[in-house]
Amino acid sequence: MRDTRTLLLVALLVAPFATAPAPVRAEAPRRPVEGFRVAGELPRAGELGLRAPEALALDHHGNVIIADTGNHRVLTVAADGSVVREFGGYGWDEDRLDTPSDVCVYEGFFTYVLDEGNRRVASYDVRGDYVGLVVAEDEAGTPVSMAVTSSGGLHLVDSDSQSVLSYSQFDERLEPVGRFGLDAGGLLDPRDVASGPGREIAVADGGRFSVEVFDEFGGRLYSVAAADTMLPVDVAFDERGNLLVADSLHDRILAFPAGGGRPTATHRVPDGFELAAVASGHGGLLVALDGGAGRVQFIELVYGGETRTR
């Protein structure tokens, strides 16, 4: 992890033009999502040969990064369907992967890959070249998903402890977020984690049929759920702090307002679309992944009136 952080600091010094946009602050005016507009699907996705993909992310160029879990590789695909790069391949050597189950991007610098079979998190640069381990095997427990923070820290869902392991951008192990339990702040079956623009930590908890949201120090903030029940398998924040939840029970995506409350909008995926993951990008762009056929749907978020946080 130290090699990754060193490269990051160098990059920040020599390439100021590549820095990420400032995140939306928690006290900034917010607008709820009032609808979803389908913008199309990733062309030629059927030609990629994907096998049971489990996760995707958007980089700062608008490329789609896909964890092709069954093929033990990661693909970066342009919006026109062309393959930009590919890396991984089955194995346990430092630059190989065993069932990669999650991917996330630290703006303009690194792609983090959750190498679930090898129980570690590895980083790759913008060319797809291996950089180093972010979290080593003996530190990761049994990881199932992850999220990178705006400052370069990492949250890692550990199914052994039923909690979220947290690491600072300085390679510092922080206190876990959540714990196994039925009471407030407890988790029963955490499946995914997302980091919000106000440093919130959202955990999709299949056991509670809800998304539990914590502050950056692990204090519970609020919980969101659907009146007709949902089974959250993936969760993402948009730039305004709204929560986007992939509900596999009803094959839909739900939008919840920043700070909690009832869903403000619902998007149902097409028949036969096995909703596995969602990821948000800049400008209100959302992508949804079909874990069966490997289709990727592009969705534009439609915003309503402006609201202010309390």
Image (tube, grey):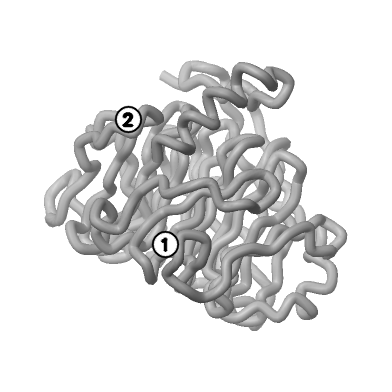
Give residue 102's mark.
Answer: none
Q: In which quarter of the image is the C terminus?
A: top left
User: Residue 200: x, y in percent?
Assistant: 39, 34
Q: Please say if 159 is above or below 146.
A: below
Q: In which quarter of the image is the N terminus?
A: top left
In the image, taking residue 108 as reference, residue 183 lies left or right, namely: left
Give residue 216's mark.
Answer: 2
Front residue (pair 117, 228): 117
Q: Please say if 166 is above or below 293.
A: above
User: Residue 270: x, y in percent?
Assistant: 68, 74
User: Residue 181: x, y in percent?
Assistant: 12, 55
Front residue (pair 79, 171): 171
Tell me if I can see residue 208 in this picture. Answer: no
**Residue at screen point 25% across, 36% down:** 173
Q: Residue furthest right?
A: 80
Q: Quadrant of residue 253?
A: bottom right
User: Residue 37: x, y in percent?
Assistant: 75, 53
Q: What residue type is labelled 2?
A: Glu
Front residue (pair 305, 24): 24
Front residue (pair 5, 240): 5
Tell me if I can see residue 181 in this picture. Answer: yes
Q: Please say if 20 is above or below 88.
A: above
